[in-house]
Image (cartoon, rainbow, N blue to C red):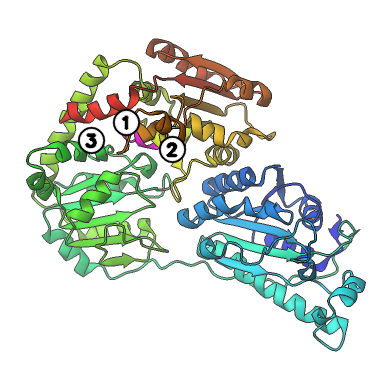
């Protein structure tokens, strides 16, 4: 096995192996050659080559999202590193274990006009768990250091200086990798290299000093007083954001769902199911917003105790409601952090949700209340009216999402793009065996395809990406790789622009609106499918869609894309009319 001759490169590889980071996504370059050599020559690592650094970072993020383990991305120096930032920010707010490793030029070649140099140290300062800035080895390319930066030799001899450098680098690598493992935050490791970059040796010249830190999470809290408050309340609301599938035992969900004093609001990304849960939050709240008796109805819905867990919430309506009609108590359960989303947070239980519920639920009892029955009646009414509405509307985004949700096979791994896609999905029921993911940390449209491709490699089930046209075109480089599985599928809802802007306030039917907000487009995506080897299908009506969906899902011999073209002008009207209709 070959090793880079540069000690710092050897340390990075050894620390990653010691901490179990085995998946490495590499973007080509020259300055990162010592790292590429170290990772690709070692059979412990599974290496992936992705040219576009922005796509590479989201690809790695998708893998880490599914594996629930750190995944590393490795790039060259200069602007290559900056392309990691969107995925770094997403990982920061979604607590995904992304390890960004960048090669850098020597400090004495930065800001002097040398090529491919920027100020790489601490470049992600505001959105990173830890930045490890390694020091340049002085026993490598010693002549250049003595010539250009003799001040880097800080001790009496080269050997003593190198010893101090190795101690610093070991400490930085331990701190950073412990952060990504324990705090579940992205980290950045910046490694300066001087030429020559490609020299190798058969045995390592250095041995990493690895400190293995315990990742033990608290499993015990004194919950008796909180259980008393819970049992004394007749209106409890449980609101769940982004949540890993199968992370909570069903018995505890059943107890929540069968308590008449509890409403459990979930979203598509919550990955929690019970017949008594409320999966379409906006279908409850939108009719209240339109009612003459809005204030009294919101008062009736207002919880005394709000219990939240999971990641970020999609629904703007529930956020607006709970900020205006605050709960008396808001408790959040998360082993790491708690967002005061509704400006009412009273208690943060720093514990895993499963451990919390296993301790808390035995202390609770069912409380007589009309809270659930009242709103369950509303739920049944809107479900019935939704069926009536679907029978009378023309083909549109709304109708298309209904058909798609009915045909997604069980045990399918679904990735959603942001903007309209994730919001439409909230309105319909899905098979409870499907798992749903979306980049809700920053809620950007960038990287959804790359994330889905990376995630597909770490999930044994077939992967379906549902995306809009702008999100798909924005991240078309996500298909520029050799890792598309034969059962990877994309449903592209093409309404020829940013349809969500027709829903938001301020819409005007003007040329400026269509150009600068909606950003209309008429590109033929079949050419992209041809270039990247995807089977292409096109539908533009409900009958065609429902006829083609079964075969689209059944065919697993080639990655496929189904383009669903919907009428741009009427989609927003149909969606807004839905909320009027169920009101």
Q: Which mark is residue 283?
A: 3
Tell me if 45 is positioned left or right of 250 in this view.
right
Q: Quadrant of the C terminus?
A: top left
Residue 189 in view (yes/no): yes
Residue 212 in view (yes/no): no
The location of residue 437, given as percent across then percent down, is 45, 41
Tell me how far mark 3 sits from mark 2, CA to CA.
22 Å
Tell me how far mark 2 sits from mark 1, CA to CA.
13 Å
Please name the residue shown 62% across and 43% down the image.
Answer: 55
Q: Which element is circle 3 on?
A: helix
Please name the residue shown 38% across and 60% down the image.
Answer: 334
Q: Characterize the local packing of mark 2: few (<14), some (14-19) or many (20 or more) Cα atoms within 10 angstroms.
A: many
**Which mark sits nearer the N-terminus, 2 or 1?**
1
User: Which label lies toward us, 3 or 2?
Assistant: 3
Tell me if 201 is positioned left or right of 208 in this view.
right
**Which mark sits nearer the N-terminus, 3 or 2?**
3
Q: Which residue is mark 2?
A: 435
Tell me if 330 is positioned left or right of 80 in this view.
left
Instruction: Identify the magenta region.
Output: 422-428
The location of residue 259, given as percent across then percent down, is 17, 48
User: Which label lies toward us, 1 or 3?
Assistant: 3
């Amino acid at each position: 096995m070959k090793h880079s001759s540069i000690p710092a490169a050897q340390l990075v590889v050894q620390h990653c192996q010691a901490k179990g980071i085995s998946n490495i996504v590499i973007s080509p370059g020259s300055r990162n050659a010592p790292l590429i050599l170290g990772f690709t020559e070692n059979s412990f690592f599974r290496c992936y080559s992705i040219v576009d650094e922005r796509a590479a970072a989201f690809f790695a993020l998708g893998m880490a999202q599914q594996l629930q383990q750190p995944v590393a991305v490795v790039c060259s120096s200069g602007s290559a590193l900056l392309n990691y930032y969107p995925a770094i920010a997403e990982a920061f707010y979604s607590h995904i274990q992304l390890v960004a490793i960048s090669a850098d030029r020597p400090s004495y070649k930065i800001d002097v006009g040398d090529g491919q140099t920027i100020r790489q140290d601490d470049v992600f300062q505001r959105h990173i768990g830890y930045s490890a800035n390694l020091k340049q080895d002085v026993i490598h390319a010693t002549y250049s250091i003595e010539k250009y930066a003799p001040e880097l030799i800080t001790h009496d001899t080269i050997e003593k200086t190198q010893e101090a450098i190795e101690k610093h680098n070991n400490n930085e690598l331990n701190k950073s990798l412990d952060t990504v493992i324990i705090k579940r935050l992205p980290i950045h490791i910046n490694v300066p290299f001087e030429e020559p970059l490609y020299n190798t040796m058969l045995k390592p010249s250095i041995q990493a000093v690895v400190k293995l830190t315990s990742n033990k999470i608290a499993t015990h809290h004194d919950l008796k007083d909180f259980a008393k408050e819970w049992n004394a309340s007749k209106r409890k609301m449980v609101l769940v954001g982004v949540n890993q599938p199968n992370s909570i035992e069903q018995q505890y969900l059943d107890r929540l769902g069968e308590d008449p004093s509890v409403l459990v609001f979930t979203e598509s990304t919550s990955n929690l199911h019970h017949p008594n849960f409320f999966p379409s939050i906006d279908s409850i709240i939108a009719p209240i917003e339109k009612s003459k008796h809005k204030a009294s109805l919101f008062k009736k819905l207002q919880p005394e105790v709000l219990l939240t867990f999971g990641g970020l919430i999609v629904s703007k309506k529930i956020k607006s409601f709970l900020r205006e009609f605050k709960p008396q108590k808001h408790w959040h359960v998360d082993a790491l952090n708690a967002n005061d989303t509704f400006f009412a947070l009273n208690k943060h239980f720093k514990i895993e949700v499963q451990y919390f519920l296993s301790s808390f639920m035995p202390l609770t009892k069912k409380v007589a209340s009309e809270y659930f029955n009242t709103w369950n009646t509303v739920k049944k009414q809107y479900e019935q009216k939704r069926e009536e509405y679907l029978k009378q509307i023309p083909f549109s985004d709304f109708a298309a999402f209904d058909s798609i949700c009915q045909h997604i096979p069980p045990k399918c791994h679904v990735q959603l793009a942001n903007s309209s896609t994730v919001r439409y999905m909230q309105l319909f029921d899905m098979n409870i065996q499907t798992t749903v993911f979306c980049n809700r940390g920053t809620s950007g449209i960038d990287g959804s395809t790359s994330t889905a491709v990376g995630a597909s490699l770490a999930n044994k089930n077939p992967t379906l990406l549902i995306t809009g046209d702008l999100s798909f075109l924005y991240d078309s480089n996500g298909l520029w790789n050799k890792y598309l599985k034969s059962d990877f599928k994309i449903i592209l809802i093409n309404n020829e622009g940013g349809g969500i802007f027709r829903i938001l306030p301020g819409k005007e039917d003007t040329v400026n609106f269509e150009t600068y907000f909606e950003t209309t487009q008429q590109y033929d995506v079949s050419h992209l499918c041809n270039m990247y080897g995807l089977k292409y299908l096109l539908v533009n009506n409900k009958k065609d869609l429902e006829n083609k969906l079964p075969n689209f899902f059944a065919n697993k011999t080639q990655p496929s894309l189904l383009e669903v073209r919907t009428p741009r002008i009427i989609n927003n009207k149909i969606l807004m009319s839905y909320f009027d209709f169920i009101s």
